[in-house]
Image (tube, rainbow, N blue to C red):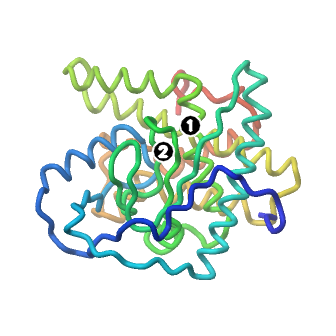
Amino acid sequence: MKWIGRRKSTSVDDRRGSGTKSVGGRTLAGGGIVTVIAVVIALLTGNLGSLTDLVGLQPSDVIEQPYIESEEDRQLFDYASVVLADIEDTWNTILPMYGEEYDEPTLTIYDGMVQSGCGTADSGVGPFYCTIDRAIYLDLSFYDSLVRSYGASRGDFVMSYVIAHEAGHHVQTLLGVTSQMNSLRQRVAAGQMSQADFNDYSVRYELQADYLAGVVAHFMKERGYLEQGDIAEALSAASAVGDDSIQRRAQGYVDPDTFNHGTSDQRQAWFMKGFEAGDLSDWDTFDTAI
Ligand SMILES: [Zn+2]
């Protein structure tokens, strides 16, 4: 993506170096509470990646480590700031066409651990959007995870996809989709809906965020910001975080009843739908075959 010298968003909250880092591999006390926090975050945010490795650490259980910004991090930070500006421009243009205002979210960039409105999160949770404080959270090291662990191709636009997907959850929140999902979640908690049925809604919710990421890419293309290979990079990232790909890599087999983000094929297809449409005309993932 062409990003050097372009406008950077001022809604980036740089919390790198201000927090703490988890202790790798250490078993910590309070596992029950940790699990609860992990589940709460899983339910609220619909994060992009898997939720393994989320740990809520007590202050006494962590080691303070100074954050040293690498050259790659410096570039990723600036890149993310430009992507967020493009996301702002996209939704500030499109939402008013539908009678809505885009209330710009904050992108919090942290390292290791962060205190979000949805609880304490470890970078192992992957990028996420918190519906309570309506902010996006991103540890820049996720880029390396996406490439090395999830198998996305190396290229800057994978991060455009990631941030635009999380911003998609913000758009869904502004347009009332997230509150409908929360109502369904309460029905599951009350025993009125099965988890498997809810998972189907969850997949549709996540695919809609992929569609919205595609809309942002469309906007970037119209402005001449895309470079050769960018869309392929986005598709490679969308494929890498597909439920089937993640499960196959993690456990060697797939269990479709537990899918909650969509398969690699579905995620790529809905990103492309948004990319081709460039608006909300085809965004209804809930009332169509996916
Ligand atoms: Zn998501």
Mark 1 close to ligand 1, CB under 8 Å? no
Instruction: Tell me if residue 217 comes above or below residue 77 in the rendering.
Output: above
Res 93 → quadrant: top right
Residues marked 1 and 2 touching at CB (< 8 Å): yes
Which residue type carries mark 2?
Tyr
Q: Mark 2 points at which residue?
A: 129
Residue 120 percent location from the top left of the image: 33, 52
Residue drawn at (40%, 62%) of the image:
123
Instruction: Tell me if residue 58 comes above or below residue 33 in the rendering.
Output: below
**For residue 170, which numbered disc appears in the image?**
1
Residue drawn at (64%, 74%) of the image:
74
Residue drawn at (53%, 30%) of the image:
173
Query: Left of 264 or right of it: where is 220?
Result: right
Quadrant in the picture for the N terminus: bottom right
Precedes in sequence: disc 1 or disc 2? 2
Residue 212 percent location from the top left of the image: 64, 39
